[in-house]
């Protein structure tokens, strides 16, 4: 038997371990970024939905914000009003949270 028999198996196993060691954290980082973006988009849309129905009253407007959040598979944590602005906070299933503010058009912040 030669001294270098089976060395290719060892090198292949090391290469696979190195690839897995890089791929798994990369996967989790990508999943966290996607969850954050999804939460931000849902918060933006929920706040816009609430603000666009502000004349219907805060209860109806927040119900529409909740409906948008449900359709985007996030949880509406809060929907409140500050003067004429709707303030919405949501949480995605992966734990990412986001908040958004929307108000009437034509008014400076």
Image (spheres, helix red, strand yellow):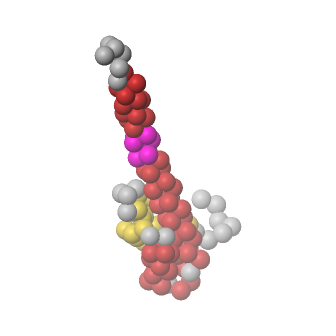
Q: Which residue is drawn at 37% across and 63% down?
A: 93
Q: Nearer the viewer, residue 64 or 81?
A: 64
Is 90 left, or right, of 37 in this rendering?
left
Name the image quarter holding residue 106: bottom right
Answer whether residue 10 is visible to the viewer in this image: yes
Residue segment shown in magenta: 22-28
Name the image quarter holding residue 16: top left
Q: Position of residue 104 (x, y in %)?
A: 61, 71
Task: Give the answer, above or below, for where 31 lies relative to 104.
Answer: above
Q: In which quarter of the image is the C terminus?
A: bottom right
Q: Residue at x 43, y 50 (%)?
A: 32
Q: In which quarter of the image is the N terminus?
A: top left
Q: Residue at x 50, y 60 (%)?
A: 38
Count of residue discs? 0
Q: Which residue is drawn at 49% across and 54% down?
A: 34
Q: Which of 103 and 40 is in front in this view?
A: 40
Q: Which of 20 and 103 is in front in this view?
A: 20
Task: Give the answer, above or below, for where 44 lies relative to 36.
Answer: below
Task: Give the answer, above or below, for where 11 lies relative to 41.
Answer: above
In magenta stretch: residue 49: no
Q: Nearer the viewer, residue 32 or 11?
A: 11
Q: Position of residue 3 (x, y in %)?
A: 32, 13
Is 91 left, or right, of 52 in this rendering?
left
In magenta stretch: residue 27: yes
Q: Position of residue 13 (x, y in %)?
A: 36, 31
Q: Position of residue 105 (x, y in %)?
A: 66, 69
* Main secondary-structure element of the magenta-colored stretch: helix
Residue that extends furthest to the top in the rendered view of this protein: 3
Answer whether residue 82 is visible to the viewer in this image: no
Task: Give the answer, above or below, for where 34 lies relative to 42.
Answer: above
């Amino acid at each position: 038997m030669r001294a270098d028999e089976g060395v290719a198996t060892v090198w292949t196993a090391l290469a696979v371990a190195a690839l897995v060691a890089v791929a798994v954290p990369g996967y989790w980082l990508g999943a966290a970024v996607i969850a954050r973006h999804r939460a931000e988009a849902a918060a933006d849309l929920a706040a816009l939905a609430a603000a666009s129905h502000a004349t219907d009253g805060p209860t109806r407007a927040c119900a529409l914000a909740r409906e948008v959040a449900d359709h985007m598979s996030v949880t509406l944590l809060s929907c409140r009003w500050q003067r004429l602005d709707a303030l919405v906070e949501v949480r995605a299933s992966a734990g990412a949270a986001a908040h958004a503010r929307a108000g009437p058009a034509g008014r400076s912040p």
